[in-house]
Amino acid sequence: MRPELSIVIPIYNEQAGLQALFDRLYPALDAMQTTYEIVFVNDGSRDNSVSILAEQFRKRPDVTRVVLFNGNYGQHMAILAGFEASRGDIMVTLDADLQNPPEEIHHLVAKIREGYDYVGSIRRKRQDSAWRTYASKAMNALREKITNIKITDQGNMLRAYGRNVIDLVNQCAEVNTFVPALAYRFSRKPTEITVEHEERSAGESKYSLYSLIRLNFDLVTGFSLVPLQIFSMLGMMLAVGSGLLVFILVIRRLFLGAEAEGVFTLFAIAFFFMGVILFGIGLLGEYVGRIFQQVRARPRYVVQTILQHQAGESQHAADAAAAAVEKRTVGR
């Protein structure tokens, strides 16, 4: 039976907080009195997360599904795999660390039922460090100007999508993408709501400073040509400016003679031009690198197995499937 609601949760080394997640998530969804499924996608966890997920599947096989990758492919690939495996008419993505309370899910579902097909969320009071909050706001503002994608809080995982948007996302074969931005492009009627935000229940953030920078590079280069266009215009202005400078120096040499006082200024100008050129080469490399990854046509991720309850299966079948997964995990 096709459920109304699917919850997609990427998992990567979350063993410390999974039980707390289960204790709040299932009661919150049961209280909504709707048909639902929870799709956990294990993104190559190296801790005991798989065994904990298998045990939870054994307890609630009717509403629990577990997708297991054979390695680590990244959070957004895990979300895309969850989208492909899910069957609900409404899709909600959620982090496993409980920074987004599961009790907020019904607010997003209510908005989807009103006719919206994309519901983003804005954290009322972020429970993150100051530098992380300000850096996120700065990148949000820059990204919106460059890509014209209006996502107020791009770092918040709690979002809801209509089936029409998910079907279009599933048709895409991009190697690198930012799922919320891709879904926003496909939505007919997007909106945002304010939700609560809590401290991380256990573990630590999987996003380092480098990962956050990398993510924003992927976001900008994946949805806009503006950076290349800006660099082209900058190159034209620098070319005109350097041409005028050379003309002035030639005139000065002809009428006033050679001068040595400005040699360090010329060095500074030359170094500035070289820096701009190197930055431009790196920016161009970002786009070329995306083309290189795309044309190789390698699978975006590899699913090892899926734990799911088939119609007519007994509890014994669910137990056997979970036990087989646990055995393979211990063997690794």
Image (spheres, grey):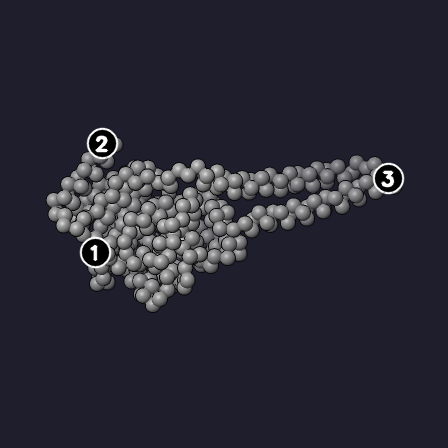
The C terminus: image quadrant = top left
Tell me which residue sits at (21%, 38%) in the image.
Answer: 325
Looking at the rendered structure, which numbered label has been put on residue 331?
2
The count of marks equals: 3
Q: Give the CA distance from mark 3 to mark 1.
A: 87 Å
Q: Amino acid at mark 1?
A: Met
How far across and how far down the image is residue 272, in percent?
65, 41
Q: Residues within 10 Å of mark 3 (few under 14, many from 20)?
A: few
Between disc 1 and disc 2, whose residue precedes? Answer: 1
Label 1 secondary element: loop
The N terminus: image quadrant = bottom left
Res 68 visible:
yes
| Residue that numbered label 1 is attached to | 1
How far across and how far down the image is residue 104, in percent?
31, 60
Tell me which residue sits at (87%, 41%) in the image.
Answer: 255
Look at discs 1 and 2 and give the one toward the viewer. Answer: 1
235 sits to left or right of 154? right
Q: Residues within 10 Å of mark 2 (few under 14, many from 20)?
A: few
Q: Amino acid at mark 2?
A: Gly
96 sits to left or right of 320? right
Q: Are marks 2 and 3 in contact (CB under 8 Å)?
A: no
| Residue that numbered label 3 is attached to | 254
Q: Residues within 10 Å of mark 1 (few under 14, many from 20)?
A: few
Q: Amino acid at mark 3?
A: Leu
Look at discs 3 and 1 and give the one toward the viewer. Answer: 1
Label 3 secondary element: helix
